[in-house]
Image: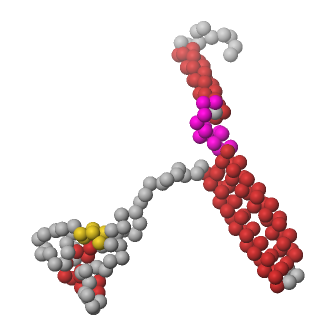
Amino acid sequence: MGTAERYRTPGDDPGTRTAERRAPGARDRDLGSGGTGGAGAGHARDGGEGHARSGHRPLWVEEPARRRRMPDPVRTSAVRAVMIISVTIILAMVAFLCTMAETWFAFPMVLSSVASTVVATWAALDVWVTRQVWNQRNGVVSVPSSTARALRRERRRARRQARSAERAQERIRRRGGTGQLSHP
C-alpha cells in the first residue's frame, strides 16, 4: 500500500519494462545523484512518459463511506450543538482569563459561561433525542415489535382501503350511477 510501482528503471533500455517497488521515502533514481538534475531532467530523459509513471500518485483516493450519512434533522441538531458547545468553550476561556486578570468583566463572563453550559448540555441532549425520535419514526430499529414498523403497516392498510374505496366509486360512476343510493 505504501509503495509506488515503476515500470522502468534508469539502467534498462526503453524496450523492456520491469516492475520495481520502491519505499515511500526513497529518492527517485531519475534525478541526478548530485541533486543537479532536478525534476525536469528525468522528465526530459524519459520523453515525457516516465515522469507520469515514476511515482505519480493522486492527491486523494476515493473510499466508500464507512458509516451512512446522518439524517437531516439529526445532522442539523448536531451542527447546532457543536456551534453552541464551541461558543461555551470560548466563553469559559474568556471568563478564566478575565478572572486571572482580575478585571470587572470576569463576573458577567462567569455568569454567561454557566448559562451557556446549561444550554450546551441541552443541545447535546437534543441531538440524542432527535436521533431517537428519527429512528422510532422511520423504522431504523430492526426489532420485530418496532413501533415504526407497526405504524407503517397501519398506514399501508389505510392506503389500500382508500384505494379500494376509490376504485369502487369509479366503478359506480362508469356504470352510470346504477346501484347508487339516492344520497352519498
Q: Residue at x 36, y 64 (%)?
A: 1
Residue 48 in the image: above or below residue 143: below
Residue 102 in the image: above or below residue 176: below
Q: Is residue 148 magenta?
A: no
In the image, residue 73 lies at what x, y percent?
A: 64, 50
Q: Residue at x 69, y 53 (%)?
A: 127
Q: Residue at x 67, y 45 (%)?
A: 132
Q: Residue at x 27, y 69 (%)?
A: 21
Q: Is residue 136 magenta?
A: yes
Where is residue 91, by image quadrant?
A: bottom right
In the image, residue 56 lies at what x, y percent?
A: 31, 72
Along the line of sight, the residue nearer the viewer: 41 or 172: 41
- Residue 19 visible to the viewer: yes
Along the line of sight, the residue nearer the viewer: 126 or 167: 126
In the image, residue 159 lies at what x, y percent?
A: 60, 26
Q: Is residue 105 left or right of residue 29?
A: right
Counting every numbered tag in the picture gives: 0
- Magenta range: 133-145
Q: Is residue 85 left or right of residue 30?
A: right
Q: Is residue 57 left or right of residue 149?
A: left
Quadrant of the snapshot with the C terminus: top right
Residue 51 in the image: above or below residue 129: below
In the image, residue 30 lies at what x, y percent?
A: 24, 81
Where is residue 121, by image quadrant?
A: bottom right
